[in-house]
Amino acid sequence: MTAALDVRKVRGDFPILGTLVRGKPLVYLDNAATTQKPTRVLDAIRRAYETLNANIHRGVHFLSERATKAYEEARLKACRFLGAADPREIVFVRGTTEAVNLVARSFVRPRLGPGDEILITHLEHHSNIVPWQMLRDETGAALRVAPIDDRGELILEEVEKLLSPRTKIFSVAHVSNALGTVNPVKRLVGMARRRGVPVLVDGAQAVAHAPVDVRDLGCDFYAFSGHKAYGPTGIGVLWGKAEHLEAMPPWQGGGDMILSVTFEKTVYNRIPFKFEAGTPHIEGVIGLGEALDYLREEVGLDAVAAHERDLMGYATERLGGVKGLRIIGTAREKAGAISFVLEGVHPHDVGTILDQEGIAIRTGHHCAQPVMERFGVPATARASLGLYNTREEIDALVAGLRRVSEVFHP
Ligand SMILES: Cc1ncc(COP(=O)(O)O)c(C=O)c1O
């Protein structure tokens, strides 16, 4: 039995939550875009600059050794966070976008030819669509898209039909950023594995909401961004099975990814360094390690999941009571995000009026234009939850939406 999340205490960990927006308390409901950072993470970054600022891996001096140790400790933290077997399987990247591009270039591209197929789904973020289109255009392979139903759930029989011996990768979101749908990733991986198809999971919207164990999921690659998990921007993780990473060519050349260089020949470094060319985002990695420990050890992801499940249920019920409001995406299992439209009001106007009340939500296509097209809307308003949100904030959102309705339908 995990301890329940103490939301009052948790809120105290995030100094920005004390912000007043035009005299009103900030209600931050844009966590799917980026999350706020706890003091622990901010302190770790500051401490890194104050106590160990130096370049890593190459130096022999005191500070460099300290920096290297902190950087590699963060890799162990990321390894534990994902339930991975081996820290060599953790590659630090800029974020989910870079991770998907790395897998596309280095794992999939060399295996892909005309007649081969790439499988994604209709609810992907653009960062899990465009890199595959680029590969398709280069190689003559086909891009297949698994459909979703009217709730925003993947149609599993269709996924089954689309997986074939020609499929060279199945790349799928764990949780949809536009709809909040939680995909049955373990089941999907099972379906793919039975046909020998490797699976990349985009975990950008998953890791901050519930525990993730890559070995339990059984996937081949798993990607996430630090900034959506209470860590810094510009840093993320690609986890990949060691056997794949070993076999993959590096995708960027430069310092640190080599063992030796002559003009005739370069010998590449071991994994994961082979994929971390150049000076990395050292303080970002350290800050990310701190954020992952905060989530896993201090707050506990089971407690986060329970707290957010309660909030999601409450928000869904309360929003359902707002006249003219339609929730887009009614999957049976949802996490993080609730998208909606308000009859007769453009989502941008919803967002602008809510901002007057100090309420931050996101409006637009959420980098998931095919999802908008599937539901026949140009855009939605999206409230997305984090571990520090409260029922009172959902009440404020609902009151704000009633005000929007009054402005447009007096
Ligand atoms: C599901 C999903 N995948 C990928 C991304 C891209 O993440 P980043 O911009 O941090 O690389 C996002 C960002 O919103 C996302 O929600």
Image: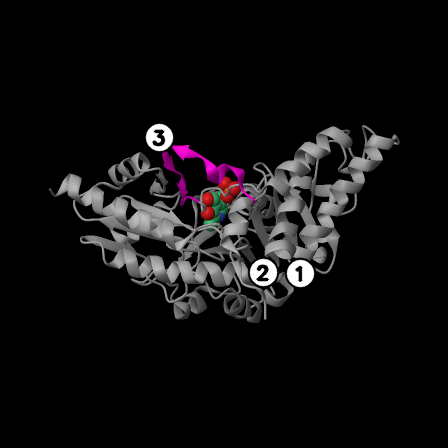
Give the image location of residue 139, x and y in percent: 51, 45
Q: Secondary structure at mark 1?
A: loop
Is residue 27 located in the magenta-colored stretch of the structure?
yes
Q: Are the residues flagged by discs 2 and 1 in contact, CB closer than 8 Å?
A: yes
Residue range highlighted in magenta: 13-30
Residue 212 has which mark?
A: 2
Q: Is residue 122 visible?
A: no
Please state which of the two labelled residues, at mark 1 or mark 3, is closer to the viewer: 3
Residue to which mark 1 is pinned: 83
Please state which of the two labelled residues, at mark 3 or mark 2, is closer to the viewer: 3
Label 2 beta carbon less than 8 Å to ligand 1: no
Q: Are the residues flagged by discs 1 and 3 in contact, CB closer than 8 Å?
A: no
Sequence-first disc among 3 and 2: 3
Q: Secondary structure at mark 3?
A: loop
The residue type indicated by label 2 comes to: Val
Left or right of 95 on screen, residue 265 = right
Sequence-first disc among 1 and 3: 3
Q: Is residue 164 above or below residue 117?
A: below
Give the image location of residue 275, x and y in percent: 69, 42
The residue type indicated by label 3 comes to: Arg
Which sits in the foreground, 157 or 228? 228
Give the image location of residue 252, x and y in percent: 66, 36
Label 2 packing within 10 angstroms: few (<14), some (14-19), many (20+):
some
- As drawn, the residue found furthest toward the left would be 410
